Image (cartoon, grey):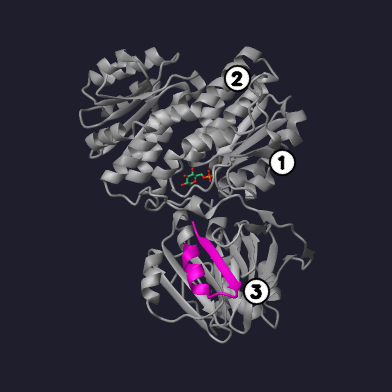
Amino acid sequence: MCGIVCYVGRRQAKPILLDGLKQLEYRGYDSAGLAVADGQSVAYHRALGKIVELERKIGDIEINGTTGIAHTRWATHGEPSERNAHPHRDMDENVYVIHNGIIENFHILKRKLEKKGVRFRSETDTEVLAHLIAQNFEEDLEEAVRRTMGQVEGTFGLAVIHRKVPGRIVVARRGSPLILGLSKDGHFAASDVSAMVRHTNEVVHLQDNELATLTVEDFSISTAQAKHIERSIETVEWRAEDAELNGFPHFMLKEIFEQPETVENAMRGRLEPGEGVPKLGGIVPVWESLKECRHIVIVACGTSYYAGCVGMYVFEKLTEVDVEVELASEFRYRKLNFPANTFIIALSQSGETADTLAAIREAKRKGARLLGIVNVVGSSIARETEAGVYNHAGPEIGVASTKIFTSQLTILTLLALLLGRHQNLSLTEGVEAIRALQELPGQIRSVLAQANHIEAIAQKYYSANNWLFLGRKFNYPIAMEGALKLKEVSYIHAEGYAAGEMKHGPIALINPEMPTVALAPLDDMYEKMVSNIQEIKSRRGPVIAIATEGDERIKEMVDDVIEIPATLDYLNPILAVIPCQLLAYYCASFLNRDIDKPRNLAKSVTVE
Ligand code: G6P
């Protein structure tokens, strides 16, 4: 969704801001803009569409200035248009503001401002911020922003410059991420470290209801009550090259191919083969309560939710804990009774998904304990949970999540194994699990080695308008994730179903034009999956089976087979999802879709 990047320093701001915006493109947006101050005037440009449109608009116009703010917008209030793109200005064209989040009381504020004679130029909620800051400004820009924070309700990560306050940017946050970046050439602020990682690895996380003032030499943080805050500097582990394509045509494909390493990274230093027990340093603070826990609720959205669904089956297999999985967006509307010592596990790549954040806040209110499995270090969910485990998977740029899914499955398995080994799981089962986990990176490589074969299957079916994905037990969520991937990147309609439910509806759709992807590895669900496949074949539906290596029987039945190596039943999803990711990728590629930035989707959904 919306992205923010700001710079004040010794270098020209324009190229730094445009490059920063490009690094944020993956978040999904519909328009972009920037404002650069040179100490006297402000250069101000906005454009509908991609960053290249903004560049085209700026053309050869010379923009000098070492202080600037820039934004990518994902429309919430007002259509995507140049008029609604950020920055927004006050009437006297002194204040320039960019904003992520939603100002909930903007209608009331707008009406009051209009009564005072303010004329609005856009339909956005953000524009009220520009007018309010202008009205609250006397001499001190930070104080004007602080007063404005007291007047607005809702969420914001915002950045402001003032034409008459040279060399200074004020930023503030409530509910939307903002990170400061420090370098010897100046200071940055961004909604996402990837916008600054080419320039610095030293960051400071701003927390809710805090403001910061940045100048070329210095930065200072204070609260909404004007209390000065000292915050330690952190070093981010992401490297600039992590956010580059390195020869791949798309980030999605690059990230699919990174999975041997990201699954390995999720286990690195966390396995104790001899004892059959993983070590998870991040949960030590809650371990005494967690090991007694008998009730877990996993909350997440999108692909992370499907990882949670697999997690539920894995916990049931390995532990004595009762596990529920809930969509974060629905969680708050349930009337859940948590038994004492219930743990909530929030799964989130970004650590900023608004519904997941809201769900953990609600769970905390009800007395639950909070764990996070998060990729982005220092993100809101990472900070608001008591303890947790990081994915250490590097930035995921493709909007459709791939490598984080398998990383989440790996970490959920480690957590279940750890709990299980303190409950009823034997040493033999623990040792067997760790041995199988260690084999996964090599096995993922062997699935990836079939990319050309999978591409050929995609070529055969990409023009089908509807697809069905079927699986049972551990692989039922993989059917849903496979369908989601295909929808997200190729815009082909697809349904993911529990294979047992096929007879209650989807079977009516089966015909020679509708391919079914059947997840049928050799496990205790195999025979039932075979029956489902036969039901489809007898209605002349094409079937692509994802099956265990060497399964000759299934080859006789189906049209196409993608083989995955044999592993433990509860680890099959980590291998079985990879052909689904590749099928989605190649179908989208044949259809010439904008694979890394599918229409209407956003990487990090920061509105509820
Ligand atoms: C968006 C993304 C998905 C992601 C979901 C949850 O919809 O496009 O890829 O799975 O948000 O995001 P999270 O960061 O919480 O895992």
Residue type (three-letter) at the residue carrying disc 1: Glu
Give the residue pinned by disc 2.
318
| Secondary structure at numbered mark 1 | loop
CA neighbours of label 3 inside 10 A, class few (<14), some (14 to 19), many (20+): many
Residue type (three-letter) at the residue carrying disc 2: Leu
**In contact (CB < 8 Å): disc 3 and disc 1:** no
**In contact (CB < 8 Å): disc 2 and disc 1:** no
CA neighbours of label 1 inside 10 A, class few (<14), some (14 to 19), many (20+): some
Q: Can residue 427 be seen?
A: yes
Q: Nearer the viewer, mark 3 or mark 1?
A: 3
Q: Is residue 11 on the magenta stretch? A: yes
Give the residue pinned by disc 3.
216
The residue sitting at 63% across, 62% down in the picture is 181
The residue sitting at 50% across, 60% down in the picture is 2
| Secondary structure at numbered mark 3 | loop
Q: Is residue 119 above or below residue 604?
A: below
Give the residue pinned by disc 1.
386
CA neighbours of label 2 inside 10 A, class few (<14), some (14 to 19), many (20+): many
Residue 500 drawn at (x, y percent): 39, 20
Q: Is residue 296 above or below residue 353?
A: above
Q: Is residue 459 on the magenta stretch? A: no
